[in-house]
Image (tube, rainbow, N blue to C red):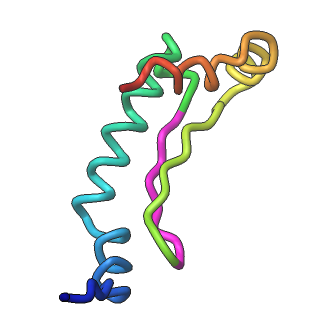
Amino acid sequence: MNKFVLDKKGVGELLKSEEIQSVLDAYGQQVQSNTGSTKDYQTQVSVGKVRANVVIRCINSNSVKDNLKNNTLLKALGGTK
């Protein structure tokens, strides 16, 4: 019986790769689009110690108030598939 051995270095490289960053950027753009106001929210992809990450954040007081009142970002996450 063959034993499966995970290549931890290879998985680490994959999680930080340009391809994964591209997927995360597309996902972030979709969430940003789902907010209904792309000018009030910003998407940023970065690479951390272990993996690439995407952040969608409020960039002005209007979007902060909207997000606090309506949970806009949380609802925008629900609209992605």
Q: Which quadrant, please, contains the N terminus?
A: bottom left
Count the labels in the image.
Answer: 0
**Where residue 10 sits in the image (x, y, percent)?**
28, 83
Front residue of 41/3: it is: 3
Q: Residue at x 37, y 48 (%)?
A: 24
Q: Is residue 41 left or right of residue 60?
A: left
| Residue span colored magenta | 42-49
Residue 57 or residue 78, whichever sits in front:
78
Q: Residue at x 47, y 26 (%)?
A: 32
Q: Position of residue 9 (x, y in %)?
A: 34, 89
Residue 41 in the figure: left or right of residue 1: right
Quadrant placement of the C terminus? top left
Report the residue that reaches farthest toward the left.
2
Vertical placement of residue 58 versus 46, above or below: above
Magenta region includes residue 43: yes
Please say whether residue 72 is one of the residues in the magenta stretch. Answer: no
Where 12 sits versus 63, above or below?
A: below
* Residue at the (49%, 10%) spot, across then down: 36
Where is residue 60, by image quadrant?
top right
Magenta segment, prevailing SS (helix, strand or loop): strand
Question: Residue at the front extreme?
Answer: 1
- Left or right: 69 as drawn, with respect to 1: right
Q: Check the image and report above or below for 42 versus 1.
A: above
Image location (x, y in percent) of residue 54: 48, 50
Instruction: Name the residue rendered at 27%, 51% in the picture.
Output: 22
